[in-house]
């Protein structure tokens, strides 16, 4: 499985997941919003770890730097 996420994209997703976790743990978000954002945070962490975003595939988005051959 080829990665399609660059380092900056992965770091931003991890930071967003940490912020969502912080907001949830301090009860600044709750209820349905907390559930939805919790799911989003889990997806962000998983996609950051594996380096592949399934939503990028149909749109042919590639944030990873490609090696240029001379």
Image: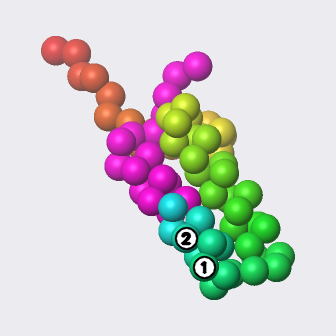
- Above or below 30: residue 70: above
Quarter that holds the C terminus? top left
The residue under the point 75% across, 80% down is 30
- Above or below 42: residue 50: above
Q: Quadrant of residue 21?
A: bottom right
Instruction: Identify which residue, 42 or 58, lies in the foreground.
Output: 42
Residue count near mark 1 (Cα–Cα under 10 Å), binned few <14, some 14–19, many ≥20: few
Dot 1: what SS? loop
Give the magenta-colored segment's residue range.
1-17
Dot 2: what SS? helix
The residue under the point 63% across, 57% down is 41
> Dots 1 and 2: beta carbons under 8 Å?
yes
Query: What number is the disc on residue 26?
Result: 1
**Gap in Å between the C-alphas at discs 1 and 2?**
6 Å
Name the residue that disc number 2 marks.
22
The residue under the point 60% across, 79% down is 26
Residue 14: x, y in percent?
48, 53
- Above or below 13: residue 20: below
Left/right placement of residue 9 relative to residue 33 reads left
Q: Which SS type dominates the magenta stretch? A: helix
């Amino acid at each position: 499985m080829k990665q399609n996420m660059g380092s900056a994209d992965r770091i931003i997703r991890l930071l967003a997941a940490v912020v969502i976790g912080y907001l949830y743990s301090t009860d600044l978000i709750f209820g349905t919003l907390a559930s939805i954002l919790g799911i989003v945070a889990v997806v962000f962490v998983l996609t950051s770890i594996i380096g592949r975003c399934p939503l990028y595939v149909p749109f042919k988005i590639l944030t990873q730097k490609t090696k240029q051959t001379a």
